Amino acid sequence: MLSDVKPDGTPDHLQEQLRGADAMTAELISSVIATACPRFCALSAAAKTKVNWMIQAGAWTDATFELVKLELPLWKVRRLSHSRGKWTCSLTKETQDGHDDITGGSHQLLPLAILHALLRVTHATA
């Protein structure tokens, strides 16, 4: 499923797509993977199986958590919060000097908030 997806945008374009999305779709998460997840794309088919299965099952939140784990192994979900109809996902990575790098994303839907945060990290580290 994911192996056939070709990059079709930039991280900024994807952020706009995510902001405007009112539902999570396989096409949307596949576009994010193809455009902003080089580590995940380089994995073997066997390693991608779990995420593919979650996408096919519509387990969007689980799929996005697993994608963060595989694409950003040094980053962890620091905080998830829901306020005024929006989810916020904060990701953190401890730096060599003991400080934390923190970034986040928000959306009305939790999996899209997680993807926003993932895109912000991949865009900043590209």
Image (cartoon, helix red, strand yellow):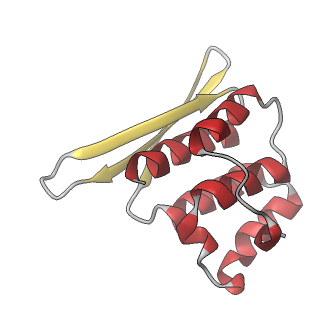
Q: Is residue 60 left or right of residue 97?
A: right
Question: Residue 120 at what x, y percent from top left?
Answer: 49, 42
Q: Residue at the spot x=81%, y=60% of the render?
A: 55
Question: Residue 17 at what x, y percent from top left?
Answer: 72, 34
Question: Residue 123 at what x, y percent from top left?
Answer: 47, 47
Q: Quadrant of the C terminus?
A: bottom left
116 relative to 41, above or below:
above
17 relative to 121, above or below:
above
Question: Residue 53 at what x, y percent from top left?
Answer: 81, 69
Q: Is residue 42 visible?
A: yes
Which residue is farthest left?
97
Q: Quadrant of the N terminus?
A: bottom right
- Quarter holding residue 23: top right
Along the line of sight, the residue nearer the viewer: 25 or 53: 25
- Quarter holding residue 20: top right
29 relative to 57, above or below:
above
Q: Is residue 88 visible?
A: no
Q: Residue at the spot x=44%, y=66% of the render?
A: 73
Q: Is residue 63 left or right of residue 123?
A: right
Which residue is farthest top?
84
Along the line of sight, the residue nearer the viewer: 57 or 45: 45
How many numbered discs sit on the rendered protein?
Answer: 0
Q: Residue at the spot x=15%, y=52% of the render?
A: 98
Q: Residue at the spot x=64%, y=23% of the render?
A: 86
- Quarter holding residue 107: top right
